[in-house]
Image (tube, rainbow, N blue to C red):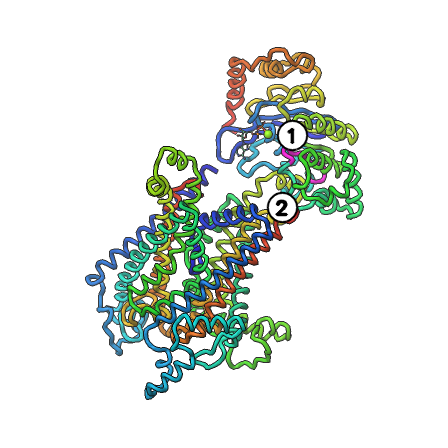
């Protein structure tokens, strides 16, 4: 049973001709992790933002649908969409240093949404905050809840953001490269933590990354993006056995192997890039008539 | 979005044009006042007092914008008033600029005790209520065109000094200054050759804005009866006159007020426009 | 920053605000405060010396001016000696400064009353006017900034930008005249002269009329006072409101791009909530510093605005004092203004330090 279903989604800069997202379709099953890979600028974050309703004002969706639990978000009124997303989805952002409001204490940043959007009473929200911080291995939760963000380390803040995302038991979490801004030593712990939390809470996860190695460990299925277009959308196992699309194959060849980290890496060949560019262009054919 | 940006530039361009147009018209009016003014701006005729402008019943032909309580022609006084306003704007503006910018440049580039002294002076100046200070100065040195100019220079030099000082400090910290020093350029020459050209756009913008301010200061001083003689046609003086008869002869205050308003607005729009031209990063 | 109560240059103001912030961040709070106190004292001394010297180089004897035409040389000499005007400027200054330190600002020449009492009698009127104007400016400017942020990228924002640009380009004096014409003559809904209708009986025991009328539940008087204050306060408020609108909108828009604001959006909050709760507290600090400094310009603007609206405050009295060459009174008023200006600046610095969580808990 799918929880998130994106169908034929196209988006572009307001007033521009070229699309940033080209006819994107993908599915995230309930409780499963779906990876979203592609090079920088491929449109990975754009998809995540579209799902969460936080596209920049300069970007407009021109066609397609985003169904959350069978309801097309794009058909809802803005307020209703916001309420639905707020109640059922959450975001684990990329940069823990900027994702917490510097002028507010940690506590309210976790509990406010529980109280104001989900209508919990304050004591329950506070108990929940302490409990969920415990789950991400933060022991002195009471002190942390009273702290300001600048008093905590980067790894600590990322844990808080993960806890905060899971606090309301959302059905879907979008994690946008949740470890790239962190120290390499902390990255592994945080990844493991996200995977643990996801498994424990049975949350569906849309996992944005450009690291196929991570995908192979965390995800069940994945979509490969190039130029805003999905070039391959498949389960993880067949993908790593042998990708269909030449670009996906090249991308895989360009990723260090877990088993053989010293093997020579192949950059994506120019011919493959040229081919996938061609396909992107072809997908634009006839689109202007819409 | 790209389109929106274009619109904004176009609108800013339009404002710049309108401002330039108004100021050009004003300069022409000032230069040609003796030929284009329909009446003598000083001629009083108590029988022709408070005549309304031409489209209102009771108007006399020849007095297009009506007359004040002493029967002086409003239009002619506005035209002649442009002379005083523009002289004050240009002379006071330039002198203020010269003195303020020089002090600011010295303070910002030389730093040390020069900066301490100038900064302290600026701080003392900023603690004076400017309008009161200017009125006080005029009361001391006596009314007259040159007094007004002196008062403006004495009070407003800090505007230039503050900004130019900050700017010169920022420029002085840049690598190109250091490399000029390494190359053996003397400090004084660095200031003129390296720093000044980079601060010049800011100075020009401030100068334009200062001209608008000078016009206003002149009007304020005329308004409290301290500008030139009460007979001389100044916009501020006309406004003061009109303020007292506002309920029975609105035109005496309205026309000089519109003129003053547009002039001040034009100077500042010109300054803003120049700023955009000079420094696209600022916006 | 520019005198005459307004600055047409938002970007330049911004630079200043940033510069000030950087300094605050670098220095120890307490040390900075001590230094500020000292420079403030020097500034006030400088102001005192300058006024003192400037008004004493006035040609013409102020005493001669106030006596009736038939007065003899001897009369003039006696009075001159009485006011100490026969001594050297330096001696006069020492005597005056000694008095000031004991709270004695001398006697007004025209009214023969103590300067301090006269000045304190008028100060409440000016304070009420300034604070009212400040509140109006914050309200108008804040609303415009929030509205512009909410509707960013639309025509509404463009209109707000143009409006703020205009409001900033024209100083309070001209706005005052425009308001007199519109709301005093064309559509006479407000009073354009005085502080309160003269025929009213005033039961007040202080000169804080606005404040006291509220305390005494005299809403009829309160309405009359507000109706007198509204236009002068608005004239003072318009340029400051424009500065607030520009600066606050700019920093709000910058803040709106930050990750924690985006994160708050995904939580289901409305756009207004996101702006006011998440973005505003962080965006407000640079604006706050600037508003403090601009407030001193606003107070400086009261001088001419009070004159324009015949409002019986300190500024109006100051202009009369200048015209009448009332030296002790001029000195007293200028010093009082300087004290207010430097005091406001000190307060701003202090509140900046207190409001910034990074400095408070750093
Ligand atoms: N606010 C914006 N306005 C206009 N274009 C944008 C904006 N944000 C992103 N884009 C463009 O949209 C495209 C997709 O960007 P997106 O951020 O989704 O890439 P990404 O795959 O997440 O890359 P990265 O790995 O660097 O995060 C890029 O070409 C980018 O230039
Ligand atoms: Mg991204």
Label 2 CA crowd tier, 10 Å (few <14, some 14–19, many 20+)? some
The quadrant of the rendering that contains the C terminus of chain B is top left
Q: Is residue A89 magenta?
A: yes
Disc 2: which chain?
A: C
- Residue B79 appears in the figure: yes
Q: Which is more foreground, mark 2 or mark 1? A: 2
Residue under the image location 53 percent in, 47 percent down: C23
Q: Do labels 2 and 1 share a chain?
A: no
Residue found at x 31% / y 54%: B94
The local secondary structure at tag 2 comes to helix
Instruction: Residue under label 2, please give it.
Output: C358
Say which residue label 1 marks.
Answer: A182
Q: In this view, does A73 lie to the left or right of B32?
A: right
Q: Which of C342 and C18 is in front in this view?
A: C342
In the shown orientation, is residue B264 left or right of residue B2? Answer: left
At x 38%, y 68%, the residue is C54
Query: Residue A113: horizontal and vertical position, in percent?
Result: 71, 44
Residue extent of the magenta highlight: A86-96
Q: How many discs mark residues in the rendered view? A: 2
Q: Mark 1 lies on which chain?
A: A
Q: SS for tag 1?
A: loop
Relative vertical location of residue A249 with respect to residue B251 in this rendering, above or below: above
């Amino acid at each position: 049973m799918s929880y998130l279903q994106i169908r034929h989604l196209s988006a572009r800069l307001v007033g521009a001709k070229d699309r940033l997202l080209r006819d994107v379709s993908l599915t995230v099953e309930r409780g499963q992790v779906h990876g979203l890979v592609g090079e920088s600028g491929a449109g990975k974050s754009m998809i995540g933002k579209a799902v969460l309703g936080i596209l920049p004002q300069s970007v407009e969706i021109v066609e397609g649908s985003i169904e959350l639990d069978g309801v097309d978000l794009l058909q809802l009124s803005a307020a209703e969409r916001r309420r639905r997303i707020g109640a059922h989805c959450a975001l684990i952002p990329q940069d823990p240093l900027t994702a917490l409001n510097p002028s507010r204490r940690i506590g309210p940043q976790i509990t406010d949404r529980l109280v104001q959007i989900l209508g919990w009473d304050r004591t329950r929200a506070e108990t929940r905050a302490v409990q969920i911080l415990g789950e991400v291995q933060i022991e002195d939760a009471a002190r942390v809840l009273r702290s300001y963000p600048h008093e905590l380390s980067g790894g600590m803040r990322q844990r808080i953001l993960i806890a905060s995302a899971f606090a309301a038991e959302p059905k879907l979490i979008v994690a946008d490269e949740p470890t790239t801004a962190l120290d390499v030593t902390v990255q592994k712990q945080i990844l493991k933590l996200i995977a643990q939390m996801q498994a424990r809470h049975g949350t569906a996860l849309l996992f944005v990354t450009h690291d196929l190695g991570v995908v192979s460990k965390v995800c069940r299925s994945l979509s490969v993006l190039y130029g805003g277009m999905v070039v391959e959308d498949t389960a993880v196992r067949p993908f790593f056995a042998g990708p269909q699309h030449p670009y996906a194959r090249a991308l895989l060849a360009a990723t260090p192997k877990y088993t053989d980290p010293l093997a020579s890496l192949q950059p994506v060949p120019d011919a493959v890039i040229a081919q996938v560019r061609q396909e992107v262009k072809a997908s634009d054919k006839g689109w202007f008539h819409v | 979005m790209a389109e929106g940006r274009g619109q904004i530039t176009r609108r800013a361009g339009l404002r710049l044009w309108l401002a330039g147009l108004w100021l050009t018209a004003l300069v022409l009016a000032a230069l040609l006042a003796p030929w284009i003014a329909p009446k003598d701006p000083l001629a009083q005729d108590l029988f022709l007092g408070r005549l309304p402008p031409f489209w209102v019943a009771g108007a006399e032909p020849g007095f297009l914008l009506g007359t004040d309580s002493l029967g002086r022609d409003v239009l002619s006084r506005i035209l002649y008033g442009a002379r005083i306003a523009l002289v004050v704007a240009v002379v006071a503006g330039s002198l203020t600029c010269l003195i303020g910018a020089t002090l600011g440049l010295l303070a910002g580039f030389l730093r040390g005790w020069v900066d301490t002294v100038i900064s302290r002076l600026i701080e003392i100046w900023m603690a004076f209520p400017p309008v009161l200070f200017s009125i006080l100065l005029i009361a001391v040195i006596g009314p007259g065109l040159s007094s007004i100019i002196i008062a403006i220079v004495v009070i407003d030099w800090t505007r230039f000094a503050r900004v130019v000082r900050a700017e010169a400090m920022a420029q002085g910290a840049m690598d190109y200054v250091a490399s000029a020093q390494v190359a053996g350029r003397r400090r004084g020459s660095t200031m003129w050759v390296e720093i000044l050209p980079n601060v010049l756009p800011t100075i020009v913008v401030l100068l334009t804005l200062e001209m608008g301010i000078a016009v206003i200061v002149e009007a304020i001083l005329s308004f409290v009866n301290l500008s030139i003689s009460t007979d001389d046609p100044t916009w501020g003086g006309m406004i003061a006159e009109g303020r007292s008869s506002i309920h029975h002869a609105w035109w005496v205050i309205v026309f000089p007020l519109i003129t003053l308003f547009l002039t001040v607005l034009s100077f500042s729009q010109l300054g803003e426009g120049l700023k955009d031209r000079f420094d696209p990063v600022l916006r | 920053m520019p005198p005459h109560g307004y600055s047409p240059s938002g970007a330049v103001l911004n630079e200043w605000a940033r510069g000030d912030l950087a300094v605050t961040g670098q220095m120890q709070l307490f040390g900075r405060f001590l230094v500020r106190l000292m420079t403030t004292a020097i500034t006030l001394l400088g102001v005192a010396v300058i006024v003192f010297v400037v008004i004493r180089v006035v040609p013409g004897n102020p005493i001669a001016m106030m006596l009736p035409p038939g007065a003899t040389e001897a009369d003039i000499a006696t009075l001159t000696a009485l006011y100490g005007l026969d001594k050297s400027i330096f001696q006069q200054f020492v005597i005056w400064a000694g008095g000031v330190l004991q709270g004695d600002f001398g006697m007004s020449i025209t009214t023969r009353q103590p300067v301090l009492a006269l000045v304190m009698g008028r100060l409440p009127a000016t304070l009420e006017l300034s604070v009212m104007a400040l509140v109006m400016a914050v309200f108008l400017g804040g609303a415009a900034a929030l509205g512009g942020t909410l509707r960013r990228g639309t025509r509404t924002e463009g209109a707000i930008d143009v409006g703020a640009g205009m409001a900033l380009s024209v100083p309070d004096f001209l706005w005052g005249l425009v308001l007199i014409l519109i709301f005093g003559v064309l559509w006479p809904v407000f009073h354009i002269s005085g502080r309160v209708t003269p025929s009213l009986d005033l039961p007040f025991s202080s000169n804080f009329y606005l404040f006291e009328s509220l305390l005494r539940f005299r809403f009829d008087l309160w309405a009359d006072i507000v109706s007198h204050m509204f236009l002068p306060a608005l004239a003072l408020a318009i340029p400051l409101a424009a500065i607030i609108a520009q600066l606050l909108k700019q920093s709000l828009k910058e803040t709106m791009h930050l990750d924690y604001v985006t994160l708050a959006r995904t939580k289901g909050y409305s756009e207004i909530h996101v702006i006011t709760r998440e973005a505003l507290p962080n965006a407000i600090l640079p604006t706050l510093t600037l508003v403090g400094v601009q407030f001193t310009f606003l107070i400086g603007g009261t001088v001419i605005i009070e004159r324009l609206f015949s409002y019986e405050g300190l500024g109006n009295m100051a202009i009369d004092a200048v015209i009448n060459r009332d030296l002790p009174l001029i000195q007293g008023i200028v010093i009082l203004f300087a004290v207010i200006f430097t005091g406001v600046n000190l307060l701003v610095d202090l509140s900046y330090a207190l409001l910034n969580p990074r400095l408070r808990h750093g």
